Structure formats: structure tokens, C-alpha cells
Image (tube, grey):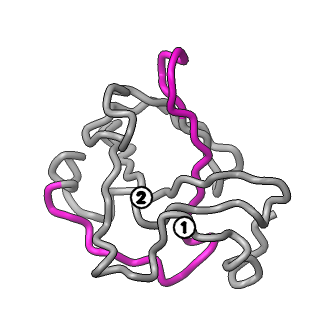
Amino acid sequence: MDFKAALPILGFESCKEVTLESIDGNFYRLFDKDGKSAPSFILIRPSLLRNDYIFDLPESAVRSLEAQTPEQIEVLNIMILDTPLENSHVNFLAPLLFNRDKGLMGQIVLDNQKYPDFEIAAPLKSYMGQQEDVS
């Protein structure tokens, strides 16, 4: 599905449209729609790894994504893949937000003072076995 970037992807502010492809319902691939430039990321559904990933969605983000309620927003996290898989990392501090109804997406950065357990590069192996197996 294609999305317009209503909020910029950090470091890729010039990227205005992206495509989100499901790999298996828990993992996704996000890439620049024109296919000519970055970004290209693997995303993961945070509930696959942790049940404590709860944060206040900024009202400005809800408005930018034209959501009527925060529940309309799907949250995914960037995953930096490594070999073996358990050496991969997940960015819980800067989630990507998607409003599928409106075709809008964006990234926010959470306050690490307010959410000290959300790392920018959390080791995947710290969460393996806590929820369902991710492999």
C-alpha cells in the first residue's frame, strides 16, 4: 500500500511517498515509492516483541495523519537486521505511524525521559522468547 509522508521520516525528509509491503503480517518492508532513493527498511509489529510498548500519541501527529482517534493509527518499528537474527536491533524510540484509511504515514520521536525503556537500538535477543517466537 502506498502512503504519503505527512510527518517526515528522520534523515529522509525529502522522501514524500512510500510503499509498505507486508512480508507476513508481523514484518513489513517500507521503501521509497519511486524506487530511486532511500529509505528501505524492514519494520516489525511491536506487539510481537513486547506487551509494554504503550505511549501517548501526540495530538499533533493524530491531526497530521488525519485520524479521528488514536486507534486508527498503526504503529510499526524499524528493525536493523543482522546475522544471526538475534543480533538484530529494533528502534522503539522513533516509531513509524500509519493511517491506512487516509494513506498517510510519518515518524515521531518519543521523549526518552518519559519512556526510558524505549531504546533507539534495542537488541532483539532481549525480547526473543518473551512473546511468541519471532523467527
What amino acid type should be assigned to the residue bearing mark 2? Answer: Pro
In the displayed structure, 91 sits above or below 126; it is above
* Lower sequence index among marks 2 and 1: 1
Badge 1 crowding class, 10 Å Cα cut-off, few under 14, some 14 to 19, many 20 or more, is many
What amino acid type should be assigned to the residue bearing mark 1? Answer: Pro
Q: Residue at x 20, y 64 (%)?
A: 58
**Place of residue 32 in the rendered image (x, y in percent of width and height, measured from the top left):** 49, 26
Q: Decide which of 123, 59 is in the foreground and name it.
A: 123
Q: Does 56 lie within the magenta span?
A: yes
**Place of residue 3 in the rendered image (x, y in percent of width and height, measured from the top left):** 39, 33
User: Residue under circle 2?
Assistant: 95
User: Residue under circle 1?
Assistant: 46
Which segment is the magenta one? 31-60
Q: How many numbered callouts?
A: 2
Left or right position of 81 against 64: right
- Main SS of the magenta part reads loop
